[in-house]
Image (cartoon, rainbow, N blue to C red):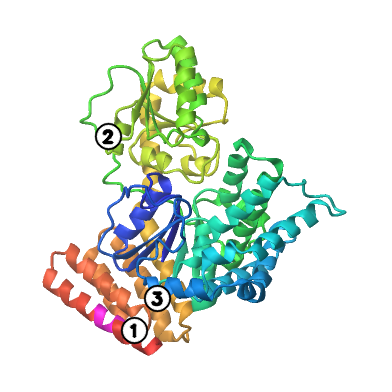
């Protein structure tokens, strides 16, 4: 079960790219995508492969009845749940759990285990009683109002006094964000969240209710991103404080219950350690891209004007305003320079700000907003230099894609950017248009330096950031967690099996498919009864397919499916 929030498969961006790579490049895994969405009206942007057996859509807004997304639940069950839900039931069964959740949000003394137990029991409660009717009862409103006012008027004085609107708004947030507790969880062997966010709550519940191990990937730092977002939001002091406390509690919850936390760069681990994550739970897995798709293209003619390319959505966090100001400085020295921004508009009001600044600086012929492109590799090749101007990043795909494309890069020193580039690009301070302009001018004036940095960037990306390495790392993580769910005795046979499997993956990564098939087959022979055996047989089939031995590959797949069914029956 791969859970997402505001990303795959309904929105474009780096996290969605990562999800799409996983579900397409790890066909040995059968996927359920659990997508938390802002509303049910967004358009699906990605085609799901056959390995995705189910897409669960969970809109937080845009529905009057939380049961609307539950297409598989008959109306009679929804009706019966409503009929059973009254104030006595809510008072006896729901309010004790609700108070535990409120204490975790309002008191600031983190007890993520208590929060996890409360949410897990709420999930169990909503299997029998109605979500909408529960939250709309008078006792829930009165309990919430009393608890928040008690903190506001208490001796500690840590909370501002809320208005009636503040109380209504913040209770409404709990109603919306916890809709995930109303959605029945699917059967799965591993739960994997794409963020330490509300989409991680189903994984936390699945771990407690169904003993499903939990893998958490952090692309950016969710808590930091919410701080940045809240600082610009038009919210009252009370509502802003409540929202950030809620987010902080949910982030700590994810950190506490995750069996493995895999940030996409070492930079992110600073926040995780600060929030109490044990080092033994952290395993960095870098993002990766396809070296065949993103590659230098000598046949592409050089642009007729000095050209700087940016691939980023139009969003305040990408700080396109600083890029525009840097363009004005560069234009004063190179009048025919061109800046091209490829990316869809994420925040229309911010796009209007960008257009206004471009007009004020007289850059209509210099800065071009090209919109979304379906050919990102060609976009990188259309420029002399690639530039990233972000205020905040995790481990941005735009940087490693540009590196793999063999381009010279100027990027702001945020997140894992310096970690990605090393010495193969130029790093500048964020929100420093003069510094960014100086770096761009240096590269635009020196074709030799651009070529050298481009070659170094390509080689560094091949060494560290290939998609094959990403797939291998996550496949190994899934196997380890699956074995953890069904504990097994570590025998010499299983030790040998793991050794042969590691050799097989290493050989497959360099294209030595014949030798890889032999190692995977030896791994299966070591212990055909291990949970890893069906997956290893699938790897044999993949290697044989690469060798063109399709009949043998089909036979290996049939054996893998039969063995998986046998093992599932034994576990059950």
Q: Nearer the viewer, residue 283 or 457?
A: 283
Circle 3: element type: helix
Magenta residues span 560-564
Q: CA distance from mark 3 to mark 2?
A: 41 Å
Per the image, label 2 sits on a secondary structure element best described as: helix
- Please state if 377 lies on the left or on the right of 213 as rendered: left
562 is within the stretch colored magenta? yes
Q: Nearer the viewer, mark 1 or mark 2?
A: 2
| Rendered location of residue 136, percent (x, y) | 58, 61
Mark 3 or 1 closer to N-term?
3
- Give the CA separation, mark 3 to mark 1: 9 Å
The residue that label 2 is drawn on is 378
Foreground disc of the pair 3, 2: 2
Residue named by callout 3: 498
Image coordinates of residue 440 in percent, x first then y, are: 45, 23
Residue 214 position (above or below residue 363): below
The Cα–Cα distance between marks 1 and 2, rounded to whole angstroms, is: 47 Å
Q: Considering depth in this image, is 565 or 8 the residue closer to the camera?
A: 8
**SS of the residue under disc 1:** helix
> Mark 1 highlights which residue?
526
Residue 350: x %, y % from top left:
49, 29
Q: Residue at x 37, y 47 (%)?
A: 42
Tell me the residue at 47%/15% (across/down).
328
Q: Are marks 3 and 2 in contact (CB under 8 Å)?
A: no
């Amino acid at each position: 079960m791969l859970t997402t929030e505001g990303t795959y498969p309904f929105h474009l961006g780096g996290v969605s790219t990562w999800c799409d790579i996983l579900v397409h490049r790890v066909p040995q895994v059968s996927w359920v995508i659990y997508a938390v969405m802002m509303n049910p009206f967004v358009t699906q942007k990605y085609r799901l492969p056959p390995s995705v057996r189910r897409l669960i859509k969970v809109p937080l807004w845009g529905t009057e009845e939380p049961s609307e997304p539950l297409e598989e639940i008959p109306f009679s069950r929804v009706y019966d749940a409503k009929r059973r839900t009254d104030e006595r039931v809510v008072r006896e069964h729901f309010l004790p759990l609700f108070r535990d959740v409120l204490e975790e949000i309002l008191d600031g003394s983190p007890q993520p285990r208590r929060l996890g137990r409360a949410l897990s029991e709420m999930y169990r409660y909503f299997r029998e009683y109605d979500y909408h009717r529960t939250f709309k009862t008078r006792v829930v409103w009165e309990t919430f109002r009393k608890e928040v006012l008690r903190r506001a008027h208490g001796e500690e004085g840590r909370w501002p006094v809320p208005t009636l609107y503040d109380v209504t708004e913040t209770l409404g947030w709990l109603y919306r964000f916890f809709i995930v507790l109303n959605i029945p969880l699917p059967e799965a062997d591993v739960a994997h969240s794409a963020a330490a966010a509300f989409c991680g709550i189903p994984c936390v519940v699945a771990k407690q209710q169904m003993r499903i191990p939990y893998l958490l990937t952090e692309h950016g730092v969710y808590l930091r991103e919410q701080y940045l977002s809240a600082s610009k939001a038009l919210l009252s002091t009370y509502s802003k404080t409540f929202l950030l406390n809620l987010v902080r509690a949910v982030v700590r919850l994810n950190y506490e219950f995750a069996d493995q936390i895999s940030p996409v760069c070492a930079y992110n681990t600073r926040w995780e350690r600060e929030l109490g994550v044990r080092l033994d739970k952290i395993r960095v897995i870098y993002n990766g891209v396809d070296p065949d798709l993103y590659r230098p293209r000598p046949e592409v003619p050089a642009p007729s004007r000095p050209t700087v390319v940016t691939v980023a959505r139009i969003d305040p966090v990408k700080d396109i305003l600083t890029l525009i100001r840097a363009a004005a400085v560069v234009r004063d020295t190179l009048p025919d320079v061109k800046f091209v921004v490829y990316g869809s508009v994420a925040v229309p009001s911010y796009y209007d700000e960008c257009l206004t600044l471009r007009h004020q600086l007289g850059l209509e012929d210099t800065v071009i907003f090209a919109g979304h492109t379906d050919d990102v590799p060609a976009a990188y090749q259309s420029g002399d230099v690639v530039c990233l101007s972000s205020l905040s990043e995790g481990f941005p795909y735009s940087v490693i894609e540009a590196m793999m494309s063999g381009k010279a890069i100027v990027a702001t020193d945020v997140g894992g950017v310096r970690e990605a580039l090393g010495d193969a690009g130029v790093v500048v301070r964020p929100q420093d248009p003069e510094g960014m302009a100086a770096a761009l001018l240096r590269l635009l004036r020196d074709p030799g330096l651009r070529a050298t940095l481009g070659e170094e960037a390509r080689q560094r990306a091949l060494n560290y950031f290939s998609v094959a390495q990403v797939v291998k790392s996550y496949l190994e993580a899934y196997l380890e967690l699956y074995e953890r769910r069904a504990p097994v005795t570590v025998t010499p046979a299983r030790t040998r099996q793991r050794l042969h499997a590691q050799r097989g993956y290493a050989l497959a990564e360099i294209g030595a498919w014949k030798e890889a098939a032999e190692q995977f087959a030896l791994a299966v022979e070591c212990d055909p009864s291990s949970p890893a055996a069906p997956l290893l047989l699938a790897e044999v089939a993949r290697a044989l397919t690469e060798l063109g031995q399709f009949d043998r590959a089909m036979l290996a797949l049939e054996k893998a499916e039969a063995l998986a069914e046998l093992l599932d029956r034994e576990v059950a």
